[in-house]
Image (cartoon, helix red, strand yellow):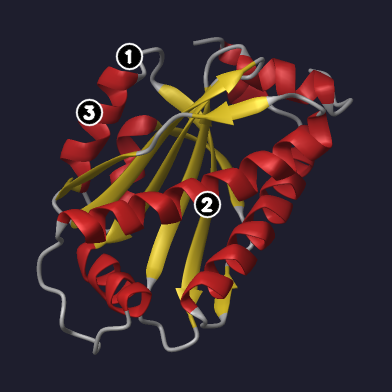
């Protein structure tokens, strides 16, 4: 991977953070409408981190999580990863399906489809923000879902990415419900070369 990703200027990081902010706002609004609950979000953190450090953000490599993964196609190909602690995924499914909280202890195929659709909606909200700032056409793939340890899911993601580099630019947002029942982390990982395309499109060149 280009070393340029390790030396972004403050202006470039601010521009990427603003895109993440709008995307997170769109995502939080969409999610709150679906589950009919107020959703709070953290101000997106824009950072350069080793991909191997991503599991630490969600509780460590051994933490059991539900992951939704999508590829993004277009002039700035990227990957999107939405990670939920397993208990948060169960809580979210109970809300989506109108069940009493605590009812879900395993995910049925219908539950998994619902979570993939949530990932799809969140990805769409982020990509709409990115397209608005860049005028780039960006299309998400059909989402894939996995239930496993965070480290294992990341290993699969690395295979999907073709081991393209040790570091990634990560726009990371945490979502929480007003009663703290659901927490989720959303990661946008541009492919090598895509970062330069995005920065040029928003007029912040390296």
Circle nearer the viewer, 3 or 2? 2
Point 68% across, 62% down: residue: 25
Q: Which residue is mark 1?
A: 163
Q: Residue at x 33, y 12 (%)?
A: 162
Mark 3 vs 2: CB contact within 8 A: no
Specify whether 62 is left or right of 206.
Answer: left
Secondary structure beneath disc 3?
helix
Q: Secondary structure beneath disc 2?
A: helix
Look at the picture and state if 95 lies above or below 117: below
> Looking at the image, is mark 1 or mark 3 nearer the viewer?
3
Q: Is residue 91 left or right of residue 43?
A: left
Q: Which mark is residue 156?
A: 3
Question: Where's residue 138, x and y in %?
Answer: 64, 27
Q: Residue at x 70, y 42 (%)?
A: 128
Whole-percent x and y of residue 151? 20, 40
The quarter of the image holding the C terminus is top right
Q: Residues within 10 Å of mark 1 (few under 14, many from 20)?
A: few
Question: Is disc 1 placed on a helix, strand or loop?
Answer: loop
- Can residue 11 be seen at all in this image of the molecule? no
- The numbered mark, 1 or 2, whose residue comes first in the sequence reads 2
- Left or right: residue 106 versus residue 25 is left
Q: Which mark is residue 121?
A: 2
């Amino acid at each position: 991977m280009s070393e340029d990703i390790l030396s972004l200027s403050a202006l470039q990081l601010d521009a990427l953070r603003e895109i993440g902010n709008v995307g997170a706002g769109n995502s939080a609004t969409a999610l709150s409408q679906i589950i009919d609950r107020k959703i709070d979000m953290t101000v997106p953190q824009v950072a350069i981190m080793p991909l191997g450090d991503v599991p630490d953000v969600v509780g460590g490599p051994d933490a059991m999580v539900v992951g939704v993964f999508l590829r993004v196609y277009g002039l700035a190909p990227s990957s999107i990863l939405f990670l939920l602690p397993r208990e948060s995924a169960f809580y979210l499914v109970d809300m989506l399906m109108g069940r009493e909280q605590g009812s879900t202890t395993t995910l049925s195929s219908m539950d998994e489809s619902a979570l993939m659709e949530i990932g799809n909606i969140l990805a769409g909200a982020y990509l709409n923000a990115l397209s608005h700032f860049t005028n780039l056409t960006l299309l998400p793939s059909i989402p894939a879902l996995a239930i496993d340890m965070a480290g294992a899911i990341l290993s699969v993601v690395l295979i999907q990415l073709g081991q393209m580099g040790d570091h990634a630019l990560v726009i990371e947002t945490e979502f929480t419900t007003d009663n703290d029942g659901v927490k989720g982390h959303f990661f946008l990982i541009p492919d090598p070369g895509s970062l330069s395309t995005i920065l040029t499109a928003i007029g912040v060149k390296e």
